[in-house]
Amino acid sequence: MEMMEYVWLGVTIVAAVVEAAVPALVSIWFVPGGILALIASLCGGSVLLQCLLFLGGSVAALAVTRPLARRLHKGGGTSTNADRVLGEVAVVTEEVDNLREAGRVSVLGNSWAARSQTPEEVIPLGEKVTVARIEGVKLIVAPQTEEGK
């Protein structure tokens, strides 16, 4: 085996190992390019031809895999607890009193520290509230209006 065969074999193996080790598409497109260049090298092709095949094979693999990966991924991701609770109805499980820095609510089966949207307002135990926003690890809540109850 000549030196270039080792180079292309190494490039192909390293690209495949990196791709297997990382949970995102980062180097898969270099594998087909490396294989094409390795074949050209084994057949006695010039270094220029090998490089062109590596580049062409890699670009072609990129052109095929990127759109496919985007379609399969769909984007958006999964909602976390932090954004899922916004706008949800919660039940006060411990009186919400901003002056005492106390209060807890239950929303979507989880207990959260809570504060009232209106600083001086005390929200009694058992009251239904709407989650207005999140500040750090606390939910900022507002009592439900009469039509929302």
Image (spheres, helix red, strand yellow):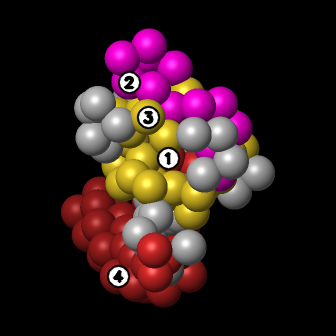
Q: Magenta region: which residues?
A: 91-102
Cβ atoms under marks 2 and 3 closer than 8 Å: no
Cβ atoms under marks 1 and 4 closer than 8 Å: no
Mark pair 1, 2: CA separation: 21 Å
Tell us which disc is closer to us: 2 or 3. Answer: 3
Q: Are there few (<14), some (14-19), or many (20+) residues within 10 Å of tag 1? A: some
Check disc 4 and give the amino acid type.
Ala
Q: Is residue 94 magenta?
A: yes
Q: In this view of the protein, which residue sits in the foreground, 126 or 35?
A: 126
Q: Earlier in the sequence, mark 4 or mark 3?
A: 4
Q: Earlier in the sequence, mark 4 or mark 2?
A: 4
Q: Taking 127 as reference, is 57 left or right?
A: left
Mark pair 3, 1: CA separation: 24 Å
Q: Is residue 66 above or below residue 130?
A: below
Q: Is residue 119 something one can see in this rendering?
A: yes
Report the residue at 68% width, 48% height from top.
126
Q: Main secondary structure of the magenta part?
A: strand
The residue at which mark 1 appears reads as: 82
Q: Earlier in the sequence, mark 3 or mark 1?
A: 1
The residue at which mark 2 appears reads as: 98
Q: Is residue 128 above or below residue 115?
A: below
Cβ atoms under marks 1 and 2 closer than 8 Å: no
Per the rendering, the mark at residue 122 is: 3
Cβ atoms under marks 4 and 2 closer than 8 Å: no
Report the residue at 29% width, 67% height from top.
55
Report the residue at 49% width, 40% height from top.
123
Tell us which disc is closer to us: 4 or 3. Answer: 3
Report the residue at 27% width, 41% height from top.
118
Q: Earlier in the sequence, mark 2 or mark 3?
A: 2
Give the image location of residue 143, x and y in percent: 44, 55
